[in-house]
Image: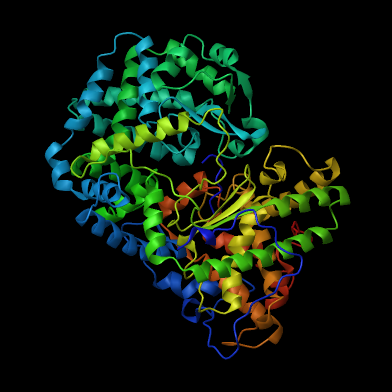
Amino acid sequence: MKKALILGSAALLLTACKPAETVTWEEPKPARNYSTVSLELMDRSVGPQEDFFAFCNGTWVKNTQIPPTESRWGSFNELEKSNNEKLTAILENFAANPGEKGSMEQQLGAYFQAFINMKRRDSMGIAPVLPLLKEISSINRKDFIVQRIAEQHREGIGSSFSFGIGQDLKNNEINITYMGQGGLGLPNRDYYFKENKRDLLEAYQIHVAKCFEMVGHTALDAGKMAANVVGLEIKLADSMLTPAQQRIPELTYNKLSFKEVSELLGTLDFRYYLSILGASTPDSIVVSHPPFLMRFANLLESEPLTVWKDYLQWKTLNHYAGSLNQAMVDLNFNFYGKTLRGKKEQKPLNEQAIDEITNLEIGELLGKAFVEKHFSAEAQQRVNTMVDHLLVVFRKRIQALEWMSATTKVQAERKLDAIGRKLGFPNQWEDYSSIDLKANDYLANVRAMALYSTQKNLAELKKPVDKNKWGMPAHMVNAYYHPLLNEIAFPAGIMQPPFFDMGAEDAVNYGRIGMVIGHEFTHGFDDMGSKFAADGSFTNWWTEEDRKAFEQRTALLGETFAGFCPMEGNCVNAELTMGENIADLGGLTMAYYAYTLTDEYRRNEIREGFTPAQRFFIAYGQLWKIKYTDAEMKNRLATDPHSPGMYRVNGPLKNCPEFFEAFKVSEGKSMRNGKGKLAKIW
């Protein structure tokens, strides 16, 4: 699940609701034939005590081919495909019937129509980006480099370092300026230094050269420019934090004065940068990693002007490559889609457009259109009830913890009681009518959206935090916990089969959406979320002894996941995935105990040869069914804070005594850790 750390009827949205201590469980009537787990996915030749993921999904894995447009395929993708069909129909209707200028219909329809009109984009070729490249190539002084970096940041181009406004971790009522590492063309620093990524680094440099050739440079010149780009990125990456280190707020929260940051940046004129960007001068800035800014400033001074010009041209070209003609789009896909992710074909244009719109400000409008046409209020109400159930169970689990002192338990319960909830969709929609979007100029739309987003973000400085704002659009198949707001959010997009099904038995719904609910709650108490208090502030609420006891237990969980290596030399990074692994184990545990309080569980009926507890665990196992290309698996192991799907099943279950009991998993079986290696956390 995604964790947001920035970044119908409205009456159905419930936020910051504290559940009552006594909750009425509303269960399905026995007379109705509710659906159960999917037997056709299972491989009964595999023992559940040996490989539960294969037991639950083995036949599906054998019979499923990853679509050529995808790098992985699983439950999330299946639901996204279903949602995309609905979203395509909405967008096609808006394109044909745009309505008034500035309306939801006009803006979404125009963006969609301009995106899919490849004939128009081909007629323009690479011409739209050439003036931008020429401006950079004509730079003749180093101080103009600073101007261009600021202009790139204004356009949403990730050049040199990151800059933006976000919620202050230590005063979370107010927004503050953040600066940090950035500017790479590959996912993170590991791709520049690890031996198992060397082939990708070489392929990347070849790709950069090909792109420069595409815009008119000779092969010889393009090769030199690519070498300059990659050489500079290697030097930038050398001073960056690892992905795992970036999860540690004690490392990344470094609050400095404007003067101190100016000194870090050396000869770079920070005030000039801010003026070009259009940003106010901040009193203080949170710098995620000061040594990186120092390194950037040193490189700005020491590297030749030619190197910086080549780098900035690449940042512009790479940013817009997917927005130009088909030839440039193909070249961009050949590296970032095929080489890096293992995809074979590009998605249809309508699906590409949906993906892009979803990640823009106007993605909220698409969510609004989806909710108006496809959201079930009944589903929202049922999920809200399940949230209440999971909260009651979580509270009881906290109260019963043997390793936590009474002092810390009080604070833990206070935090649990304060968790807010966003279910379905926002109670107030943003107004985007001021953005001028055209049906015949895609690149102009891209630039207009980027400028709008930048200006909107910069205007947030020193303003109170908007706690009604959502971290993702309503149609997205995802959910999140926001540590600074201490809230969970479940968009309408995920409240559908197979995650939630009004026609499914409780074993299925608690094993799936129930686990997801518990997962998001547990993020408030994982290795990072547990460092934030009930009010969302970055404040310690633990005794020293309790924190040590917690970390001893999480270390045991880390041992489980560190042992998962899907291919030689490529293993799960237990530090990077720790938060998600804790949340998976906690979510599974909370959902199971919530399910045991239902009438269905107490009736103990055997269905399809399985007990209620067994069906719950099978439903959980089938939720995470997934296949990856080899390239995608390597990429996710290096970048994703979530463990691969098969380990999200087997890893938590190796630390779940309730699973051992349900499937008679004895000591020595593969689905158990070594003796004494049981991580009991929440």
Q: Is residue 246 above or below residue 86?
A: above
Q: Residue at x 79, y 44 (%)?
A: 547
The one of 585 and 217 positioned closer to us in this rendering:
585
Q: Is residue 151 left or right of residue 624?
A: left
Q: Quadrant of the N terminus?
A: bottom right
Q: Is residue 124 above or below residue 114?
A: above
The one of 484 and 477 positioned closer to us in this rendering:
484
Q: Quadrant of the C terminus?
A: bottom right
Give the percent coordinates (x, y) of residue 95. 22, 54
Q: Is residue 62 left or right of residue 210?
A: right
Q: Is residue 34 left or right of residue 67?
A: right
Q: Is residue 522 above or below residue 211?
A: below
Q: Is residue 45 above or below residue 211?
A: below
In which quadrant of the rendered view does residue 399 lie?
bottom right
Q: Is residue 22 left or right of residue 2?
A: right
In which quadrant of the rendered view does residue 332 lie?
top left
